[in-house]
Image (cartoon, grey):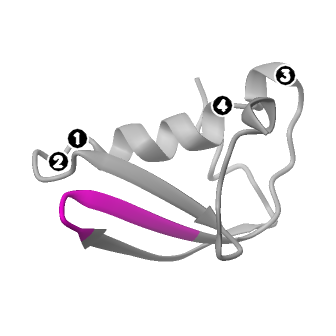
Amino acid sequence: MSNFVSSQSNLFFDKATIENGTAKIYLNGSVAYGGVCDDPRLETQIAETALQFDSIKNVEIYLNGVLYKTPSQK
């Protein structure tokens, strides 16, 4: 699987914070989806990257300041 996040030309990392075991990842821009299979990729790739660290128990992703939900979960 390719890195979905890095292939997004209009999506930019802003910052990451850690609060009580929760990694909060902040992104700005927009996400371009190539199809239904792309829906969970952004969330999955970011979450799995953060969860590799023992101190991280949960991950929250924010897109333009709003808690991100994959399109299929909206």
Per the model, the C-alpha gap separating discs 1 and 2 is: 4 Å
Q: How many marks?
A: 4
Assign a secondary structure to mark 3.
helix
State the extent of the magenta-drawn residues as a range: 19-26
Q: Nearer the viewer, residue 22 or 42?
A: 22
Q: Amino acid at mark 3?
A: Val
Residue ID at (41%, 65%):
24
Q: Identify the residue under disc 3.
A: 36
Query: Neighbour class for label 2 at 10 Å: few (<14), some, many (≥20)?
Result: few
Q: Identify the residue under disc 2.
A: 53
Q: Are marks 1 and 2 in contact (CB under 8 Å)?
A: yes
The first of marks 1 and 3 along the sequence is 3
Query: Neighbour class for label 3 at 10 Å: few (<14), some, many (≥20)?
Result: few
Per the model, the C-alpha gap separating discs 4 and 2 is: 21 Å
Image height of 37 relative to 5, above or below: above
Query: Neighbour class for label 4 at 10 Å: few (<14), some, many (≥20)?
Result: some
Assign a secondary structure to mark 4.
loop
